[in-house]
Image (cartoon, rainbow, N blue to C red):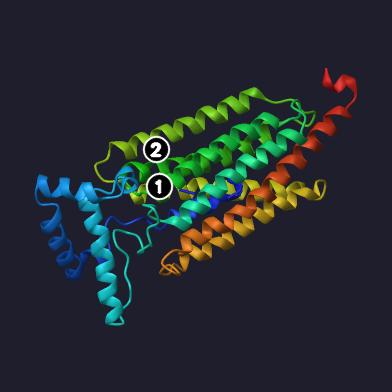
Amino acid sequence: MRAGHSCCCWIVSFLLLIPFATSSSGDASETFKDHFRLCRNDHCSSLFMVNEFEKVQPFYLRLLGWDCIEECKHISMWQTVENLQQKNLEIPQFFGKWPFLRIIGIQEPASMLFSLLNGFGHLYMIRKLRSQVPRNAPMYYAWHIYSLISMHAWFWSTIFHTRDTIFTEKMDYFSAFSLNLSGIFMISWRSIALRNHGDINLKVVLGSAAGLVLIFWRHVSYLSRLKRFDYGYNMKVNLLMGLINTVWWIGWSLRNIRRKPYLQKPVICVLAANLLLLLELGDFPPLLWTFDAHSLWHAGTFPLIFVWYSYCITDCKHLDSSTKSLPKTWKS
């Protein structure tokens, strides 16, 4: 994955530099293996045992896919953590994740909650844009497309942090990539396709959209065909798109900031998002077994949404007023 959507797209590419592992030192330890083997033999080794297990399992755990084997992994993880704490040893990751307190079956409750807030933040702000910006204003419908892509990405981030499976992980990665590409699409629309007199060069818009959809399709189809997810390839592609986003948005904003001081807002978003990257680089075991660096990053992107849409609203109003003030001969 996964800010005020455009602010977030470049930082997502950098976050994807840190590949998610399918195994970690915690689940590779003999202590974990011993606990897991014992749990599996006691509860999951026959159909009768599994049926008995399911009878006492809360429905919400079954709903989220916590079957007998997955439940044994979860229990064994905490047993291993307890053993390590008794020996004053460092707590490792398990299956590429830190140990998190599970709340009503939610695997990473803090990241899930903050992802949900980000999604609702986009919904709230696009409604605000609709109430303040005329429908015929340049970029009005463009930001609606952008907002839908943003909410879709945060939806899958919410689902993935609720329950990490092969499917939800891929959807989180793929929607994060769509977020990355949407930033390029929006800056190409704003800086190239939108003419000074408010008209839109549809050839640029459609050409940009077609090219980015093709990139997305090839990226997703390639990764979907692989037996094992290629984290390295995904990292490189996202990094490239993230760098394009960063350079293009900051370059265009700084080039026009004297005439349009409100362009400081996109710059603030980009700089703040990159500062939040330090949280990921300084990853640490979760505070209270709930708040890790990744969840705090999600928390940090939430306020950037309001800064970003403030730019969107101001820019739309500026474009609308500029178009209305043009001589009629320019509009014809």
Specify the farthest residue to the top: 332
**Residue 283 location, x and y as percent?**
44, 67
Q: Is residue 132 above or below residue 94?
A: above
Residue drawn at x 76%, y 33% is: 133
**Residue 39 location, x and y as percent?**
16, 60
Q: Is residue 46 left or right of residue 25?
A: left
In front of the other: 118 or 48 = 48
**Residue 86 location, x and y as percent?**
28, 80
Hey, what amino acid is under mark 2? His
Q: Which residue is mark 1?
A: 160
Q: Which residue is mark 2?
A: 219
Dot 2 crowding, Cα within 10 Å, few <14, some 14–19, many 20+: some
Hey, what amino acid is under mark 1? Phe
Q: Is residue 207 left or right of residue 141?
A: left
Element on which disc 2 rests: helix
Residue drawn at x 39%, y 33% is: 218
